[in-house]
Image (cartoon, rainbow, N blue to C red):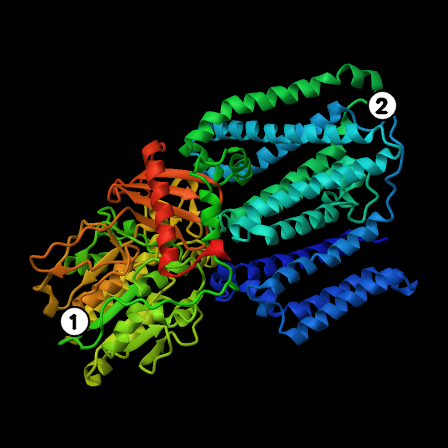
Amino acid sequence: MMRTALTRTLVAAFWMTTALYALLSASPFASQQFLQPRLVPAIAAFAVWHAPLSLGVLVIVMVGLLPYLRSGDRVVWAFSGMWLGTALLEVMSGGLASLRPSSIAVAVAVGALIPPVWLALLDLGGLNTDVEIRLGDGPSALSDFGACAAAAIVVTLTQAVLTRSVSPSLAQWSAGVARSLILHLAIFSAMFAVISIVRGVARPSPRPGAVETWLARIVVTAAAGLFVHRIILAALALTGPVAILLAVAFGAACALIVAPCGTRAPRGVEAALAGAIPNWAARSSLLTIAWTLSALGVAIAAQAMVSASDWNFTVAKTIAAISWVIALGAMLRLVPRWLPRDGAQRSTAAMVPFAACLLILGGQQFTWSGLLAANDARLSTWTAKDMSSRLIVDALAPPAPADGGLYEFLQRNTNIPHDTAVAPVNIEFAPLTQRAAHRPHVFLFVVDSLRRDYLSPYNPDVAFTPAIARFAAESTVFRRAFTRYGATGLAVPSIWTGGMLLHKQYVTPFGPMNTLDKLLTAEDYRRWMSMEHIVETITPPNAALEPLDAGVPVKDQRLCRTLDEVRGRLDRIAAAGKPTFVYSLPQDVHISTLTREGSQPIDDNGYAGFNAAYASRVRRLDGCFGAFVDDLKTRGLYDDSLIVLTSDHGDSLGEQGRMGHAYTVFPEVIQVPLLVHLPASLRSGYTADASALTFTSDLSPTLYALLGHTPSSPSPIFGQPIYTGSGDTRPARVGTQVVASSYGSVYGALLDDGRRLYIIDAVSLREYEYEMDGSAAGRSISIRGADREAGQKAVRAAVDEISRVYAYHPDQR
């Protein structure tokens, strides 16, 4: 019935976006760390204004449906009434922005698929798929193979546009394009085999047109559902029966939506992909080519836009998959027009495409198996831009070997659902019965995503942080400092707790586990703190708190602004008669900040060898930090202050093609700067081994020790003081230390006292190993069997210990 492709596209785009927002809301970490802080203003605005937007889209759709509404078509009237009722219900229930991780969010995600599916079914009801297919009728195997090969070439060339920037020479770029072409020819040859099977099964049936069309749609449903399950839902840590339900629902919806979008498509396989080509573009070869090039151009631009801030490459992979559908749908239309239709010729050449298909698949297996197994750095760099190749590589790479059930074990203990009740446990480092004889002021600056190799104390090639260099000369520079968690969600709470945490966002009330808050309360510290969403959740209300950056969204908090506010209050410190604790988590160099600000430098200085956008912002915060330190010195506060400059985690800025930090624990993500300035009253009595393995979760027990409360660790998963009394020896850590991603089941083991890093990724089912050679990204090495065994054993033991400490037993639930 519905023949307006634009209206169909509008309905599909609006409701699929709604469904995806609900999916994000159903994921505990995505809701807590991405949606609620409103890191992407456009997505936040979509949720806030969803109800009026829905009514606006409905008006446009009803204009397209006007002829059917006038004729009294009950199905169309019911469709419009359902939509209107949904919008009114949303207004009464608080709107899309009020969704939180729950079964309601899952229900909304599935329910949002109903309008585009309903409209697609209206279209399908008017199509003729019962036309008899006779022997020699329809496309030949040669034209099918030609269409698949042409689609592989089109997609390869599309991705080649994006990869030119990562190849220093034309020869290297050409070699990379050739490797990409081999991959794409292999995957599209597999598609040709599937198409041939579908056509062959349908041909003998009494209604071959209908059978072929619906078999093809079933194949599309399975492929789309598998993609949603393995790529999208895995990235959101949605697993189990709920994930299967969502995958089936989204797979079926995608299959129906990509079916005829307002066009009387040919029957069979072509009909199942007809939605990739609008009605006007299907009228001639020239228009089809024009549409395909335009659509793929948009895909290139979109992929380039999200490449620097993607979530485990999920969005870019989705764009790549859409480009496959567009290319294949177009080539299935075009190639048969260009090939001869003589039956004898097709019969003679019938075996040629199948032989070519087998040759390509076999050759690909021999060519790529070694490269995939070796985790070749060239391939990683290339596939950071060629997301279509990355999608294929990730699919072809066999799961890394893991001990019995390790992947499932990690998934059960990671991203524990929001509605799973877990009671907090009481964590105590020491009895806090007496206050310290002297309590220095404490300034804790945790610069989100700050890399240590962009600071001159760690990298002699850095010339743009002179103030931090001066500060480092008067402080302890811990050379081997790590975060316990990649990404902020659990990295910040681990600092306040002083150890590793149950992988849930979050166990509440969090206060009993917040050892740093207990210390500050017992020592009667006045608090000036930037109250971003995480700290608001993990710190109990306190009358001594005076917020910094009040009214400033976390995404807009910058160190310079915060320090200006602190400097404006410094005169009050001396008059207060009590110590002050200052805390901030500035977002100056967070990858989302760089992306929102155009990923461009903010000054004209040269930053050869560095990411200019990142380095220019480090230069700016260095100047502000230096002015703050100078102000402390001028006011006589510097020598009575304990000042910590660190980061919650690092970031990937192109190492082996990696960007971001959300799901990874690569060396550049878990290594952090840690500079600590002691007040004069403590310098003579304490020493530190700056070369020892150190964690940001050591900061809380360190403050206990420096304030005279000897901490006793309740478990090896907690930190230890990084300063000891003069003449004392820092105790050795117990067991292999483990790190983890905040948002996914990705864990790392620091073997040989942190000299090697073994990573087990239970999201992608991959493993990696690095030598921690002092560089930012370490050196990728082949997996050693003994290291695999030791690393997996350490990860399992650490997760078991976390469950024991926090009294969580997933196998009993």
Could you say where residue 111 lies in the image, as x and y percent from the top left? 69, 60
Towards the viewer: 813 or 783: 813
Q: Residue flagged by tag 1: what amino acid is it?
A: Lys
Q: CA distance from mark 1 to mark 2?
A: 89 Å
Earlier in the chain: of badge 1 and badge 2, it is 2
Which type of secondary structure does the marked residue at label 1 adopt?
A: helix
| Disc assigned to residue 633 | 1
Which numbered tag is attached to residue 136?
2
Q: Residue 802 in the image: x percent, y percent?
A: 37, 56
Residue 365 on image: x %, y %? 54, 24
Name the residue rendered at 70%, 41% in the picture.
220
Q: Secondary structure at mark 2?
A: loop
Quadrant position of residue 72 = bottom right
Nearer to me, 502 or 425: 425
Q: Amino acid at mark 2?
A: Gly
Front label number (1 vs 2): 2
